[in-house]
C-alpha cells in the first residue's frame, strides 16, 4: 500500500504539464492588477472627486 502511494506521489511530482499555464495566468493578472491597485491607492480621492463632478454634470444636464 505504501509503495503504491509513493509511486503515485512520484508520478504526480514528475508530471509538470500545465504548471507553466497557471503561473502565466497569475503573472498576467499581477501585471494588470498591481498597477491598478497602486493608482487607486495613490489617486483615490482625486478619482472619487472627478467621478462625483462628472456625475453631477451628467445628471444636471439630463434634468434640463
Image (tube, helix red, strand yellow):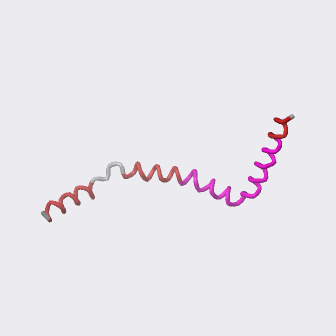
Residue at the far front: name it: 63
Q: Quadrant of the C terminus?
A: top right
Q: Quadrant of the N terminus?
A: bottom left
Query: Is residue 15 toward the left or the right of residue 5 in the image?
Result: right
The quarter holding residue 61 reads top right
Residue 62 versus residue 44: which sits nearer the camera?
A: 62
- Residue at (63% x, 53% y) in the render: 36
Residue 49 versus residue 27: which sits nearer the camera?
A: 49
Query: What segment carries the magenta color?
Result: 30-57
- Residue at (54% x, 54% y) in the render: 30
Q: In the rendered view, would you say 5 is above or below 62?
A: below
Q: Position of residue 25 (x, y in %)?
A: 46, 49
Report if residue 31 lies within the magenta region.
yes
- Residue at (15% x, 60% y) in the render: 4
- Residue at (20% x, 57% y) in the render: 8
Q: In the rendered view, would you say 63 is above or below 32?
A: above
Q: Position of residue 22 (x, y in %)?
A: 41, 51
The quarter holding residue 63 reads top right
Q: How many marks?
A: 0
The kind of secondary structure the magenta stretch mainly shows is helix
Q: Position of residue 32 (x, y in %)?
A: 57, 50
Residue at the far right: name it: 64
Q: Position of residue 47 (x, y in %)?
A: 74, 53
Amino acid at each position: 500500500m505504501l509503495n503504491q502511494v509513493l509511486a503515485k506521489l512520484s508520478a504526480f511530482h514528475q508530471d509538470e504539464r500545465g504548471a507553466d499555464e497557471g503561473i502565466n495566468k497569475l503573472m498576467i493578472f499581477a501585471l494588470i492588477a498591481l498597477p491598478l491597485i497602486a493608482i487607486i491607492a495613490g489617486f483615490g480621492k482625486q478619482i472619487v472627486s472627478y467621478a462625483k463632478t462628472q456625475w453631477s454634470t451628467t445628471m444636471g444636464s439630463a434634468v434640463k
